[in-house]
Amino acid sequence: MTDKPLCVPNGFRFGGVIAGIKKSGKPDISLIVGDQPLVAAGVYTTNQIVAAPVVWCRRNTPSQSVRAVIANSGNANACTGEQGDADTAEMCQRVADALGCDASDVLVMSTGVIGNLLPMEKVRSGIDDVLQKLDTGVDAFVSAAQAIMTTDKSRKTCSRQLQIADQTITITAMAKGAGMIAPNMATMLSVVTTDAKLTPEQATRLLKQAADGSYNRVSVDGHASTNDTLLLLASGQVGELLSGKDETTFANCLNELCVEIARELVADGEGATHWMKICVSGAQCDRDAELIARTVGASPLVKTAITGADPNWGRIVSAVGYAGPPIEPTKTCLTLCGVLIYENGRPLPYDAASLSKTMSQSPEVLVELIVGSGSGAGVHWASDLTTTYVTFNSEYTT
Amino acid sequence: MTDKPLCVPNGFRFGGVIAGIKKSGKPDISLIVGDQPLVAAGVYTTNQIVAAPVVWCRRNTPSQSVRAVIANSGNANACTGEQGDADTAEMCQRVADALGCDASDVLVMSTGVIGNLLPMEKVRSGIDDVLQKLDTGVDAFVSAAQAIMTTDKSRKTCSRQLQIADQTITITAMAKGAGMIAPNMATMLSVVTTDAKLTPEQATRLLKQAADGSYNRVSVDGHASTNDTLLLLASGQVGELLSGKDETTFANCLNELCVEIARELVADGEGATHWMKICVSGAQCDRDAELIARTVGASPLVKTAITGADPNWGRIVSAVGYAGPPIEPTKTCLTLCGVLIYENGRPLPYDAASLSKTMSQSPEVLVELIVGSGSGAGVHWASDLTTTYVTFNSEYTT
């Protein structure tokens, strides 16, 4: 996706700089500024242990007067007590002073290691620096997107354009996330920018709907983070307030973009070599189908079978059985990469070597399950589990 | 534990042989026979996809007329449809014919790969063979215990003796399990034999109670199996029917033995180098505390931190936050290997190098969490996650 051309919506400036928060010396302070007050909506982690920046953003969205989003990587400012809250407030105040707005009109995101206080001297000078580097255009957007990355191997950015009443509306998203990826909106940092005109209520509704079908359907390790934040910022510089059919067109485009970027999160899962697309049907309701798909995607035994291109399908079927929602064992069927191998509770003969070859050659392994005769259906994307994930995460801070 | 002397209860004979079901050529048919009809109780997997032998055992326990337990490793006889049910019945019938009892008085367990039909020719000759090898004593018991092992590195056996009314009662267990280990009684195969005298109802009650505090509190990979079975067999050859204080003494001894063997399952988790003992208190109820402890133990990020002897405690605290049960973030405290590092929502200074050294040197890493001011408490044991687990499970069948 990063090969496709990016388009940047009107009404924004972006910047990313190296403040020295990360030991690696990579960019770690990111800023997005609206030329005018922005409509902003947010969807946040469902973790009960929430980082200071999430508390701040929850308090200040939805809004129609947001001027900026300041973000740092390399430190999550989570589990940092009152000092963490004070540091978050100071970050926003510093940006607000430079822009001449209220601190509550500045949103904030942090990502990185949990439990350390922010190195505020570096953060302050990074903020002062990035304020000088703001620019419009793709290069500036990319700088901002790079500065929120942590363990990501690749930058996650994505653009869509749509025509509404002869006007070209742009929607462009940046995201970070490779570990601590779990469904139920606890997945990552992501900012979606658009020049469409939306009300705060409309932005909130459309963003929640898009998150439900995308960010909430992916998992890498099932560990829900303390910091995850998805923001939609609308500058309103193109066209009229969206309504009716135009709103639907915009919503569909936003949903597609979110699915695309959420899939990128999974594809870049720490150490991942493949991902699964797990489609469950025949459940008693959609919620049950999703929970079953999620449970299959979370099983370390299923994940390692995918890693090894091993059609060890009993692991998949047994995960369906312990997911929780009621299933009908004698109506349960599994199709793996298009090959039906378990039908109505009975194993079918299949060519294991050929199926293994198909699994190893495709980055996406399609897992299709029928679990009964109900009408519930759902889909989930999950990464595989490799020795690289384990090595990486057993050596992360020490 | 396997170094401690084993004692075998009166009234049983045991055997284990090589039938060729396992490619490795290791023992794979195990038989336990009662000299007289045995009282038998069982606790089984909660997976909705259940293997044929589990269906058979559920139907035939509790009982006071069980004569034998036949078991095979190397093949789970799960997801095998009607043929799987017929094969299970044939295994029991063959043993019953030799012993001159009803097939319903023979219990059966299978463990191994899911989804393949049993190689019945090998199973039949293995059964005929093991019937000739039955013996009393420790060596025979050990043979039977070895023949149920699959990916286990070490044999899991454990004995306790207790004095009741001047009589020595023996309780001796065998178990297998290293992968597909998840809490909620879906953990392994285990047979507890005793020469105490119990009613079927008493045996069922005491076994469930013991399982709740032991087998249901351990996890390796959180994948609940289709086959897991815990049986209690009582020959009744020593002493009178247990009641009152004597029953309590017996129950305590049974509980301790089950905790010890359950901990061994975790210690031998596939590829495991350490295990965690996670103690949660201050929850709103015991059930909540257990769920929190289990969630911490299931997080791949927590597991890999333990593998790396990395006191990356933010991963532990954030897992508490997404477990589900209500917690009080500002009253949350974490003590790792005896060192208080997070108190009432605030990080404390600590010597990370020293703590890392302690973590690396102890096989058991003690994780103590206070999550609020409630009275709920619970404990869970979980293995760490190593590259060996991943390598092993991505190369298991292909």
Image (tube, coloured by chain):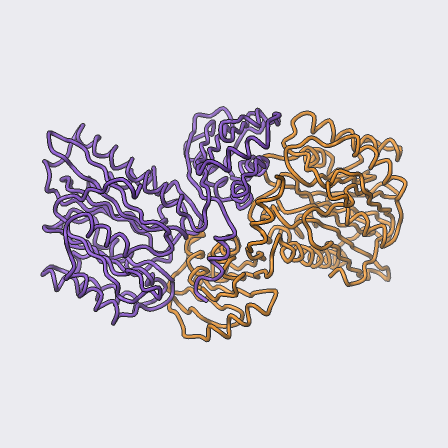
Chain colours: A purple, B orange
Q: Can you tell which quarter of the image residue A195 is in?
A: top left
| Residue B288 can be seen, yes or no | no
| Whether residue B292 is situated above or below residue A166 in the rendered picture | below
Q: Can you tell which quarter of the image residue B8 is in?
A: bottom right
Q: Nearer the viewer, residue B376 or B383?
A: B383
For the N terminus of chain A, the image quarter is top left
Q: Nearer the viewer, residue A210 or B237?
A: A210
Q: How many marks?
A: 0
Q: Position of residue A331 (x, y in %)?
A: 55, 25
Q: Nearer the viewer, residue A176 or A56?
A: A176
Q: Position of residue B366 (x, y in %)?
A: 55, 65
Q: Position of residue B217 (x, y in %)?
A: 59, 53
With A37 as the anchor, is A397 left or right in this view?
Answer: right
Residue at the spot 72% in from the left edge and 47% down from the top edge = B149
Residue at the spot 70% in from the left edge and 37% down from the top edge = B75
| Residue A98 can be seen, yes or no | yes
| Whether residue B295 is situated above or below residue A7 in the rendered picture | below
Q: Position of residue A165 (x, y in %)?
A: 11, 29
Residue at the spot 79% in from the left edge and 30% down from the top edge = B121
With B291 as the anchor, is A51 left or right in this view?
Answer: left
With B32 as the anchor, is B62 left or right in this view?
Answer: left
Q: Nearer the viewer, residue B211 or A264?
A: A264
